[in-house]
Image (tube, rainbow, N blue to C red):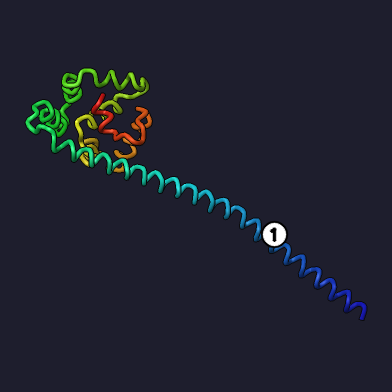
Amino acid sequence: MLELAISENRNKTLHNIIKSESRSQYIKFLYPFGILATILIIYLSYFIRKSRVLAKQEKESQRYLNKISENRNINDEDYSKLYEMLKKNDLAFSMFFNEVFPDFSSKLININPNLSSSEIEFCALIKLKLPTKDIARHTYTQPQSVRNKKHLMRKKLFIPKEQDIYQFVENI
């Protein structure tokens, strides 16, 4: 009888050890999964927030472009010539742009001396008041890439969130 009690006691002890082992393995699995889930949630919230900001800025830009297009003189020769040069991918576009807007590049460089020539050309397209889709077509990129580039340019040019990038660049 004593041996039976000892055997049952050993059996219970072994079952308790097995249960505690399985719990610890479950907890070891649960921690990395929890950390991964937390990182994923943080990344998704950042991505959603950024998408909302870009969408809001894009709406503001579109509203501004619509307002300006009503007031713009369509017979403006310089604008038409610049737009035609851009459509034809003419290499003289930047030279003619600098003739039409002689201080534009220097004012941009005064704001941020670290701007590259491609960023200045991007600002030139904004100066021409081209919508995002047209900029994407002329630069052979996706509209989302143009939106991201606008967001980066806002940071590089220290444009306040309340101000539209088209308005800012027009005033340069």
The residue drawn where x is 34% and y is 22% is 111
Name above or below for residue 98 compared with residue 30. Answer: above
Name above or below for residue 50 compared with residue 123. Answer: below
Name above or below for residue 64 compared with residue 112. Answer: below
The residue drawn where x is 49% and y is 51% is 41
Q: Nearer the viewer, residue 24 or 127?
A: 127
In the figure, residue 8 lies in which quadrant? Answer: bottom right
In the figure, residue 12 lies in which quadrant? Answer: bottom right
Percent of width and height locating residue 58: 29, 42
The residue drawn where x is 23% and y is 18% is 103
Q: Nearer the viewer, residue 62 or 98?
A: 62
Quadrant in which the C terminus is drawn:
top left
Percent of width and height locating residue 106: 28, 18
In the image as oriented, which residue stretches furthest toward the right? 2
In the figure, residue 170 lies in which quadrant? Answer: top left
In the image as oriented, which residue stretches furthest toward the left? 75
Q: Nearer the viewer, residue 6 or 151?
A: 151
Percent of width and height locating residue 130: 20, 36
Percent of width and height locating residue 78: 11, 26
Relative to 98, is 81 on the left or the right? left
Q: Type of residue at label 1?
A: Ser
State the residue position of label 1. 24
> Disc 1 on helix, strand or loop?
helix
Q: Nearer the viewer, residue 169 or 96?
A: 169
Quadrant in which the N terminus is drawn:
bottom right
